[in-house]
Amino acid sequence: MVRIRGSIGDWPVDLTLELDDDDWARLGALLPVSPQDSAIPTASAVAKPVNQDVAQWQLAREILCKAGQMSGPQLLEQLEVLTGNATAGKRLLVRLRHCAEVKVLSGGDTPLYSWVGPH
């Protein structure tokens, strides 16, 4: 958990962020690492989850691209298989929802995800 307190101009800010292990790994990959500090993982140890995240993102896009169109539950099921857990699958689904190459139609019982990017 990270707490940020301060102000933006005249507005007070009190923000609490809850990060899971994957979030901390991605954040850690962005920070410079001092080789003298053995308590902090090396850059190569932290980079692995980020590379996995990039690979999973590319595969998620490819799944939808090949299908052309999928319902939200069908796509989520595929993403859960891809990532190995429900939370990571849901993150990819949200990321796809906001991707410029994906159009989401909300109607009926479930959203319909359509690939509109280049094939």
Image (tube, rainbow, N blue to C red):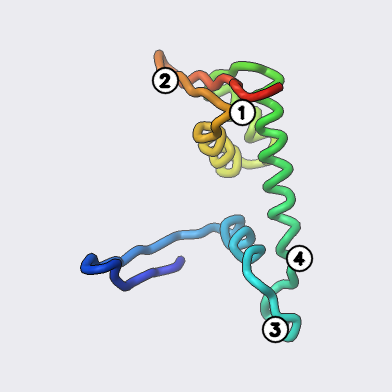
Q: Tell me, yes or no, whether the two marked residues, 4 and 3, touch with CB atoms within 8 Å.
A: no
Q: Amino acid at mark 4?
A: Ala
Amino acid type at mark 2: Ser
Residue visible at 33% across and 72% down in the picture: 5
Query: Quick one: label 2 or label 4, which is nearer the N terminus?
Result: 4
Which residue is under mark 3?
37
Going by the picture, which residue comes out furthest to the bottom? Answer: 36
Secondary structure at numbered mark 3: loop
Q: Secondary structure at mark 4?
A: helix
92 above or below 40?
A: above
Q: Earlier in the sequence, mark 1 or mark 3?
A: 3
- Tell me if mark 2 has few (under 14), some (14-19) or many (20+) residues whose alpha carbon lies within 10 angstroms of its own: few
Residue position marked by numbered label 2 in the rendering: 106
User: For mark 4, what is the residue?
Assistant: 45
Question: Which comes sooner in the sequence, label 4 or label 1?
Answer: 4
- Mark 2 vs mark 4, CA separation in Å: 41 Å
Q: Which label was assigned to residue 12? A: none
Q: Residue at x 59, y 21 (%)?
A: 116
